[in-house]
């Protein structure tokens, strides 16, 4: 019996091994590049390290402080328009953080757009705290959606029993709710931390010297060895974060009745005020600025091929990321070795796009048939955003596979047949969710696209960066609006697939 179980697990592990090897290839290339120069850890390095750690800590803390209460509100409270509130709070995922940074850079401070409208100059959004504020606005939905998923599986009877036994609301939260949502909280905080560590454009626009900005400077100065050393230090921070996330344990019970409370009118009004303020800060300001610039500058000079060059590679990356994530998610559900495989592939999300692009250029120069092609760009997207697809698929497998697949096996189906005929149709909503997230991130990925796009191919993101560097803000209007529109459609698809997955899980229960 033990041998059969081991053989069964081995069949799940083997298809995932090539994907893990490919995902870990950038780390090997970085080590090779760094070997050309000894590590020099001076005052500049300490400053960059401190800025990066501080930015990550502030962003994760801000995302948790905003995301957790709003997850409770949109999941556990009965109020009119809850679906609209959730859509408004998830909307920042459709706006790249560098668009927000671009908007705050152009709108705040002396000579900014808000000064001409308001008659006075609001404080500049710059430096560490300004960057952390902008990053928080565009990453807190990771925490919001992850905690919501955990809350939807929480049995309300446990909380009611705890209150009946005399626990205060705070005690019920600490001793009953928190142990059952900390897995979702850790997953959301992990995504926020990895996103913050890998973001290049937002700190660069707002003037904060982090590892990603230093790597970009070294890359442009042809200091590949020093850029590789900075990248390896950044990966060390990623490894520390992954380690702490792996230590989080979550109590799991069979899903039951979802917590539901009816808030007072005053509380509901305050909640809507908070939702409106967050939406205006994250989405309203960039939209208003782009529409203002569009009215001033018009649409002349924009090539529709730019939109096609953005959408097609992102869609291909979404499909291939799901195909690669499926064996990884199945392996992770099989045992500890599979879970470590999954964590190794998470390094891609922590590698900055500029570093991933440098690594793939280094590889592409030795494989000329793929260099500067759409295929190379798609490979880069898949390696960067594979953890988003694996996270969604693993969540889907954890919800539904145990019940239905075991029933199919008991009726004589082979493991492959049970997966193909039972599990695969049931996890389709999870696959759709993962594909939508990958599409979102690929559409707005900037530095990787700058390095790997085919020669002469312009995308929405590269056009925005060229406009920022040239200082012609008005020409950013149409590319920015189209990027937000395309990303919003993907976000609606993600929310729809999340609802479908919830319905599947409820029907099984």
Image (cartoon, rainbow, N blue to C red):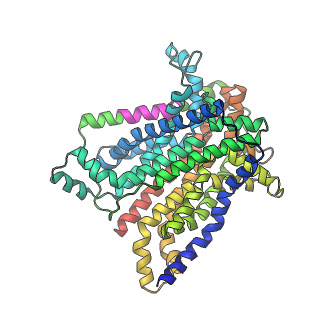
Query: Is 463 covered by the magenta stretch?
Result: no
The prevailing secondary structure element of the residues shown in magenta is helix
Q: Is residue 174 above or below residue 11?
A: above
Q: Position of residue 235 (x, y in %)?
A: 61, 47
**Which residue is located at x 39 percent, y 65 percent?**
505
- Quadrant of the snapshot with the C terminus: bottom left
Q: Position of residue 19 (x, y in %)?
A: 64, 64
- Quarter residue 79 falls in: top left
Q: Position of residue 249 (x, y in %)?
A: 40, 57
**Which residue is located at x 46 percent, y 41 percent?**
140
Left or right of residue 219: residue 106: left
**Which residue is more in the foreground, 400 or 266?**
400
Instruction: Judge whether residue 354 can be spotted in this image.
Output: no
Q: Is residue 254 above or below residue 479?
A: below
Query: Is 283 covered by the magenta stretch?
Result: yes
**Which residue is located at x 76 percent, y 36 percent?**
220
**Which residue is located at x 40 percent, y 50 percent?**
147
Instruction: Judge whether residue 325 can be spotted in this image.
Output: yes
| Range shown magenta | 273-285
**Which residue is more in the foreground, 223 or 296?**
223
């Amino acid at each position: 019996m033990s041998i059969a179980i081991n053989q069964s697990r081995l069949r799940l592990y083997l298809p995932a091994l090539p994907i893990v090897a490919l995902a870990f290839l950038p780390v090997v290339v970085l080590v090779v590049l760094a070997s050309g120069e000894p590590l020099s850890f001076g005052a500049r390095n300490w400053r960059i390290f401190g800025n990066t750690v501080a930015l990550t800590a502030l962003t994760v803390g801000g995302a948790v402080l905003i995301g957790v209460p709003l997850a409770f509100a949109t999941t556990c409270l009965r109020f009119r328009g809850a679906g609209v509130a959730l859509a408004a709070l998830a909307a920042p995922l459709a706006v790249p953080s560098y668009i927000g940074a671009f908007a705050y850079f152009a709108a705040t401070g002396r000579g900014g757009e808000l000064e001409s409208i308001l008659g006075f100059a609001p404080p500049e959004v710059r430096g560490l705290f300004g960057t952390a504020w902008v990053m928080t606005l565009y990453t807190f939905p990771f925490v919001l959606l992850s905690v919501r998923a955990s809350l939807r599986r929480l049995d309300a009877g446990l909380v009611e029993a705890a209150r009946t036994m005399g626990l205060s609301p705070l005690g019920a939260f600490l001793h009953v709710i928190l142990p059952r949502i900390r897995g979702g909280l850790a997953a959301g905080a992990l995504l926020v931390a990895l996103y913050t560590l890998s973001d290049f454009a937002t700190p660069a626009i707002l003037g904060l010297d982090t590892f990603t900005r230093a790597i970009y400077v070294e890359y442009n100065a042809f200091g590949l060895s020093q850029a590789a050393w900075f990248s390896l230090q950044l990966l060390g921070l990623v490894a520390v974060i992954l380690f702490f996330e792996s230590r989080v344990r979550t109590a799991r019970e069979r899903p039951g009745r979802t917590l539901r409370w009816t808030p007072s009118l005053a509380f509901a009004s305050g909640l809507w005020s908070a939702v409106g303020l967050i939406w205006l800060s994250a989405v309203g300001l960039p939209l208003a600025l782009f529409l203002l610039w569009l009215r001033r500058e018009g649409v002349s000079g924009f090539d529709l091929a730019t939109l096609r060059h953005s959408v097609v590679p992102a869609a291909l990356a979404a499909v291939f990321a799901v195909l690669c994530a499926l064996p990884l998610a199945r392996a992770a559900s099989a045992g500890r070795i599979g879970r470590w495989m999954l964590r190794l592939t998470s390094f891609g999300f922590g590698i900055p796009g500029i570093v991933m692009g440098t690594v793939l250029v280094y590889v592409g120069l030795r494989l000329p048939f793929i260099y500067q092609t759409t295929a190379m760009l798609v490979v880069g997207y898949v390696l960067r955003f594979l953890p988003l697809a694996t996270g969604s698929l693993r969540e889907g497998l954890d919800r539904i596979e145990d019940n239905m697949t075991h029933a199919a096996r008991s009726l004589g189906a082979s493991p492959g047949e049970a997966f193909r005929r039972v599990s695969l149709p049931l996890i389709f909503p999870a696959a759709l969710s993962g594909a939508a997230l990958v599409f979102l991130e690929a559409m707005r990925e900037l530095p990787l696209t700058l390095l790997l796009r085919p020669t002469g191919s312009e995308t929405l993101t590269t056009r925005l960066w060229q406009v920022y560097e040239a200082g012609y803000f008005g020409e950013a209007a149409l590319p920015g609006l189209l990027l937000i529109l395309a990303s919003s459609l993907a976000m609606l698809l993600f929310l729809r697939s999340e609802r479908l997955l919830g319905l599947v899980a409820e029907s099984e229960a």
